[in-house]
Image (tube, rainbow, N blue to C red):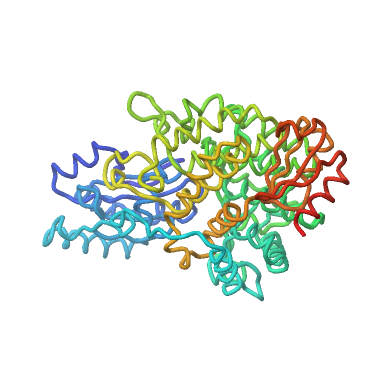
């Protein structure tokens, strides 16, 4: 994007830190995103002001970081949203930080930081708490974890506007899916609120969030990762209800992803779309058509693409939508062919950030987890051959990132605070959940034990987890009770396989082309839950009966 600022931005890297050390001055770290409207506004109103820019250039080493391209920097220095304006000592420790700053606010902060540096120097800097506490509190996995999370959702549920919490209002797809099996009325009212308030009725796709409790104050950016996750969530709501009011938002979002966010050159999905012109999203259809199309960040990132693949294949599994299948297969081919090397999934196709020393891709836990989940979903819905890649991804993640009883977000190397270990709860949970699915699909119990160990590593704090971490309770429930498993002795796409995918439990695991031994006949299916195993079924009707019988 064009840079309207007068600040002489440096790239994130050792050179910038060396410069700050040599000059004995603090650093100004600006965390931005291409889709962030307030970031562009701060560039126009604050960083473009000549005296402010001169002040920064003379007294600081300014560094600009795109948070989508540098997620490890984002996770260590985020001040609660973007833009984040962070002042650092030359060793990377934090002096102070804020979000958006207008010209007057920036002048005050610049003066304050300069005074702080002149009087205290690096002694004024601090290491953020998550980077000081290396090990999370471990504990026992019990059914109370699921009950406590349901209690959290019930307590924070908004009876008036739907969804959870006060403000801002995010769609929270993991919470929607958790509630779908455990309090369907609360879940469906929240699905209704998300589609009524965040779905773009004109172009399709979901806006990022509403700033206020009633979902007003819409933030009009659209991100691939949240839209991919919402396709899956709404497809699962359709699975449980059979109602078009949940299928149609998923369908409109598939249309948006495969049209607006599809990058033909890369044969994958682009990362995001910015809000565009002021008030364009409030225009009627005729005026909207004449408005300038909001810009798209064409960057291709493995993690968001994996979420889109999983969402599209989930939708395809319930609808036979060929468009969803076709685009999911194309993005999957790019993921496997261009981004996957010896089990390590490169963060992006943009070489300068995807590759580390020696042109080797850097393993990032969130990316590895999302890719593994996309591969296990592919194995259940389309083709089992991808399980070889799935096991390679799982094994590489364990080899490179496993530390103690959980996983680090990436290698403990880099500049600034990136060299300090970070154990992100959400990425650990996502990887553990994907390992559970891989264990069932491959019959490899070691993946299940690794998933258990990872979930136990955080269990001591599980009573404090908010609704944003609902997937922790989902994964714990699947591990303790055993997921519903449907073993199908037919090829993917056969009637019996399609029927298995459409049985109304979105947490189930379907194994096509299964061979469960001499007591399992080809062309039949059976249902398993823990130690319980049903009789064989030869037709979709018999399979439905077997599921009902096993769950009674």
Q: Position of residue 120 (x, y in %)?
A: 12, 61
Q: Residue at x 66, y 76 (%)?
A: 160
Nearest the viewer among 500 and 213 is 500
Q: Position of residue 278 (x, y in %)?
A: 57, 56
Q: Up-down: is 330 above or below 548?
A: above
Q: Position of residue 62 (x, y in %)?
A: 28, 47
Nearest the viewer among 508 and 275 is 508
Q: Residue at x 43, y 38 (%)?
A: 398
Q: What is the total number of numbered labels drawn onto the structure image?
A: 0
Residue 335 appears in the figure: yes
Screen quadrant of the C terminus:
bottom right
Q: Is residue 177 left or right of residue 104?
A: right
Q: Up-down: is 117 above or below 292?
A: below
Quadrant of residue 510 in the image? top right
Residue 273 appears in the figure: no
Q: Position of residue 371 (x, y in %)?
A: 55, 37
Q: Up-down: is 147 above or below 84?
A: below
Quadrant of residue 84 in the image? bottom left
- Outermost residue on the left side: it is 119
Q: Is residue 111 left or right of residue 120?
A: right
Q: Is residue 62 left or right of residue 429?
A: left
Q: Up-down: is 59 above or below 213?
A: above
Nearest the viewer among 496 and 213 is 496
Quadrant of residue 165 in the image? bottom right
């Amino acid at each position: 994007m064009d840079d309207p600022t007068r600040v002489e931005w440096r790239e994130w890297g050792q050179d910038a830190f060396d410069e700050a050390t040599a000059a004995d001055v603090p650093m100004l770290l600006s965390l931005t995103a291409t889709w962030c409207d307030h970031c562009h506004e701060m560039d126009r109103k604050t960083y473009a002001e000549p005296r402010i820019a001169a002040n920064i250039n003379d007294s600081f080493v300014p560094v600009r970081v795109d948070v989508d391209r540098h997620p490890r920097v984002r996770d260590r220095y985020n001040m609660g949203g973007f833009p984040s304006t962070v002042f650092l000592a030359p060793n990377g420790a934090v002096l102070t930080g804020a979000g958006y700053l207008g010209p007057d606010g920036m002048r005050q902060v610049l003066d304050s930081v300069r005074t702080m540096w002149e009087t205290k120097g690096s002694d004024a800097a601090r290491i953020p708490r998550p980077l000081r506490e290396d090990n999370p509190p471990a504990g026992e996995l019990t059914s109370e974890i699921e009950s406590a999370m349901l209690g959290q959702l019930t307590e924070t549920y908004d009876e008036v506007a739907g969804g959870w919490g006060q403000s801002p209002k995010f769609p929270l797809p993991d919470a929607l899916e958790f509630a779908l099996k455990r309090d369907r009325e609360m879940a469906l009212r929240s699905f209704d609120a998300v589609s009524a308030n965040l779905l773009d009725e004109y172009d399709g796709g979901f806006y990022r969030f509403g700033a206020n409790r009633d979902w007003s104050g819409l933030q009009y950016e659209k991100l691939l990762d949240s839209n991919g996750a919402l396709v899956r969530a709404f497809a699962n709501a359709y699975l449980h209800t059979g109602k078009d009011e949940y299928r149609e938002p998923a369908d409109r979002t598939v249309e948006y992803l495969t049209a607006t966010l599809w990058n033909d050159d890369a044969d994958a999905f682009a990362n995001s779309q910015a809000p565009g012109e002021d008030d364009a999203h409030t225009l009627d259809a005729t005026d909207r058509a004449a408005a300038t199309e909001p810009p798209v960040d064409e960057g291709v990132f493995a993690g968001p693409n994996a979420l889109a693949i999983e969402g599209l294949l989930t939708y395809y599994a319930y609808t036979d939508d060929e468009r969803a299948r076709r685009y999911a297969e194309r993005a999957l081919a790019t993921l496997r062919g261009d981004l996957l090397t010896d089990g390590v999934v490169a963060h992006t196709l943009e070489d300068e950030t995807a590759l580390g020393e020696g042109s080797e891709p850097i393993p990032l836990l969130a990316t590895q987890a999302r890719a593994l989940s996309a591969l296990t979903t592919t194995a259940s819905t389309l083709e089992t051959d991808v399980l070889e890649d799935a096991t390679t991804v799982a094994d590489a993640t364990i080899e490179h990132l496993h530390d103690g009883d959980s996983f680090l977000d990436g290698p403990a190397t880099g500049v600034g605070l990136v060299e300090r270990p970070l154990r992100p709860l959400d990425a650990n949970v996502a990887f553990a959940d994907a390992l559970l699915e891989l264990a069932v699909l491959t019959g490899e119990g070691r993946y299940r034990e690794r998933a258990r160990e990872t979930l136990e590593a955080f269990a001591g704090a599980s009573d404090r987890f908010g609704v944003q971490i609902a997937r922790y309770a989902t994964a714990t429930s699947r591990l303790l009770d055993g997921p519903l498993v449907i073993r199908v002795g037919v090829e993917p796409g056969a009637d019996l396989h399609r029927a298995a995918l459409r049985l109304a439990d979105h947490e189930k695991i379907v194994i096509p082309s299964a061979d469960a031994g001499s007591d399992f006949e080809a062309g039949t299916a059976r249902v398993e839950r823990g130690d319980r195993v049903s009789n064989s079924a030869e037709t979709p009707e018999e399979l439905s009966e077997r599921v009902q019988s096993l769950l009674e």
